[in-house]
Amino acid sequence: MNRRRMNIGRISSQRGISFIGLLFLGVIVAFLAIVGAKVVPTATEFMSIQKAAKKAAADGDTVPAVRAAFDRTASVDYISSISGKDLDITKQGDKVVVNFAYEKEIALFGPAYLLIKYRGSSDGGYN
């Protein structure tokens, strides 16, 4: 009974988020969702390019053969950001290594753009 009297006398403060806070949080989440929807396709294209570079390095022995193998795979996988002529092809020992680098510019709104620089290699490392 003594505890009951102590709790009745206290005024409890409300907890939670206000409408303005909820609106602000909603705008931030919507912005992140829009940016994510624009970035995900470029990331999947990068993974396709990485796979095509590994396949081209395994299939070709000469520079023109590697470029042709990459272009064949790129046409099937809808790769448009890079072509066989953009590849840097080297030989390390008896292994063909294909390096690539490119930039993807994504329009956000008005004059704001997001620039993503992708680079990769058929041996899994980055130069």
Image (spheres, grey):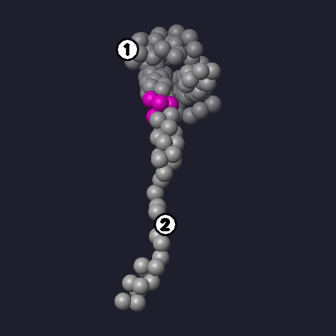
Q: Residue 50 location in percent, x, y?
A: 48, 26
Report the residue at 46% width, 57% height from top.
16
Q: Decide if residue 24 is in sight here.
A: yes
- Decide if residue 6 is on the left or right side of residue 105: left
- Residue nearest the observer in this picture, 57 or 5: 5
Q: Residue 110 location in percent, x, y?
A: 59, 21
| Labels 1 & 2 near each other (Cβ < 8 A) | no
Q: Main secondary structure of the magenta part?
A: helix
Number of callouts:
2
Residue 106 magenta: no
63 shown above or below 102 = above
Q: Looking at the rendered structure, which numbered label has been put on residue 76?
A: 1
- Camera-near label (1 vs 2) is 2
- Decide if residue 46 is on the left or right side of residue 89: left
Magenta residue span: 32-37
Q: Residue 57 location in percent, x, y?
A: 48, 22
